[in-house]
Amino acid sequence: MQFAVHARDRIDSTQSEVQRMAAEGAPEGTVVTARHQRAGRGRRGHEWWDAPGESLLVSVLLRPSAPPAAVPQLSLVGGLAVAEALATAGVAARIRWPNDLLVDGRKVCGILAEASSDGAGRVQHVILGIGINLNQTEFPGALAERATSLRLVTGRVHDAGAVLAVVLAHLERRYAAWQAGGFAALRAAWLGHALLPGQIVRLPDGTRGVGEDVGEDGTLLARASDGRLVAVVSGEAIEEAPAHAAGH
Ligand code: BTN
């Protein structure tokens, strides 16, 4: 895949910009970055806060030939690519299923996969959005408890362009493997960077469970309090328990 990186200064959201470009026929590998987003968005309708120039804010246009049911796997693919990229910077981040990256329980990266399908239900494109906290030394309000940055973890300043290059290199490799063999081809590597087993999750019925494993399709297998093993699809709304509150 060829990446074409379009660097913006201030923008509403890199997701929205890629969406606009995709509507005009932009090819797979179109990438938009920004120094600041006025309306950055996270999963489940949350906003994504950034301090101008201190985060890596990036969206990547993918045009996979995959059924809609496989699309949520792409956020796991993205999580693995970022975990591997951060490892090269000396940061051992763990993936909280489906796709938050945490260091010592604090969120350092969030990932958002937004898909668009045509009238016949075929996937037209997926926009993979990645927000990495790079150089913040403090976070406002409730984020102070929940978020961290590469700088806080490593004690040094990180260059957005350099981190982007490493993230894209890992994404290219893992995306190719996923296209060839599905999530099954990445599952072992993904588990190697995951919080599982033991991640506390809120199950679709509202009760708490303990994540045990992930299936070959990216589904989370969690043990409910009554002993049942519950399968949770990554596209499903799922709230983490307070101990693992999101970093946005
Ligand atoms: C989450 O953890 O809720 C996902 C956060 C995703 C944030 C990134 S920043 C770049 C891209 N543009 C957006 O508006 N959101 C994603």
Image (spheres, rainbow, N blue to C red):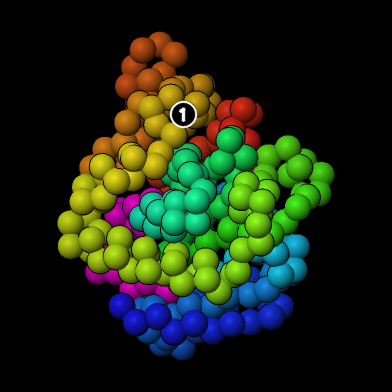
Specify start and end residues of the magenta stretch as a single range: 60-76
Q: Is residue 66 magenta?
A: yes
Nearer to the camera, 222 or 5: 5
Nearer to the camera, 150 or 38: 150
Q: How would you rate the neighbour count of disc 1 (Cα within 10 Å): few for under 14, some for 14-19, many for 20 or more?
A: many
**Residue found at x 58% / y 28%:** 241
- The answer to whether residue 221 is left or right of residue 108 is left
Question: Tag 1, which secondary structure?
Answer: loop
Residue holding disc 1: 199
Q: Residue furthest bottom?
A: 24
Q: Quadrant of the N terminus?
A: bottom left
**Residue found at x 50% / y 56%:** 89
Nearer to the camera, 124 or 41: 41
| Location of residue 196 (image quadrant) | top left
Is 24 placed above or below 179 here?
below
Is 53 placed above or below 196 here?
below
Nearer to the camera, 48 or 194: 194
Is 8 placed above or below 106 here?
below
- The answer to whether residue 6 is left or right of residue 229 is right
